[in-house]
Amino acid sequence: NHKNQLTFLTSTGQMAFTHYILHVVVGILSAYFLFGENNLSTLTTFLYALGFCSALMIISFFWRKYFQRGPMSLIMRFITG
């Protein structure tokens, strides 16, 4: 079924705001604290980014099975009422 094959991408796109925040707060800061500033080769950086994006896609897929909105959207709705 063609629709089921795109579920990973759909879920990831619907959580774009959450992923934008996570890539800065978790992705970049964890790389900085783990490896230091400018200490990664191009290949390591690529593999780290690929792994991070893959993890976000998997998390998005399972998150969307249980919740309609992403975590950041839920937080923003809670704060703003």
Image (cartoon, helix red, strand yellow):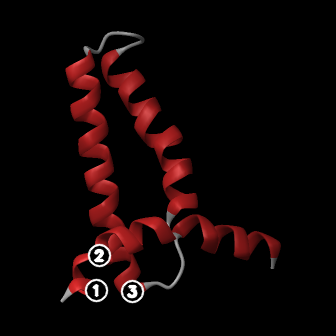
Which quadrant of the figure contains the C terminus? bottom right
The amino acid marked with disc number 2 is Leu
- Given residues 81 and 38, the one toward you in this image is 38
The answer for how far apart the CA atoms under marks 1 and 2 are is 6 Å
Residue underneath mark 3: 66
* Location of residue 55 with respect to 8 vertically, above or below: above
Upstream in sequence: badge 2 or badge 3? 2
* Location of residue 35 with respect to 27 vertically, above or below: above
The residue at 27%/54% (across/down) is 55
* Location of residue 32 with respect to 63 vertically, above or below: above
Residue underneath mark 2: 6
Residue 49 quadrant: top left
The tally of labels here is 3
The answer for how far apart the CA atoms under marks 1 and 3 are is 19 Å
The amino acid marked with disc number 3 is Tyr
Task: Give x and y (percent) for residue 77.
Answer: 72, 75
The amino acid marked with disc number 1 is Lys
In the structure shown, which secondary structural element does the residue marked by tag 3 occupy? helix
Compared across the picture, whether 28 is left or right of 21 comes to: left
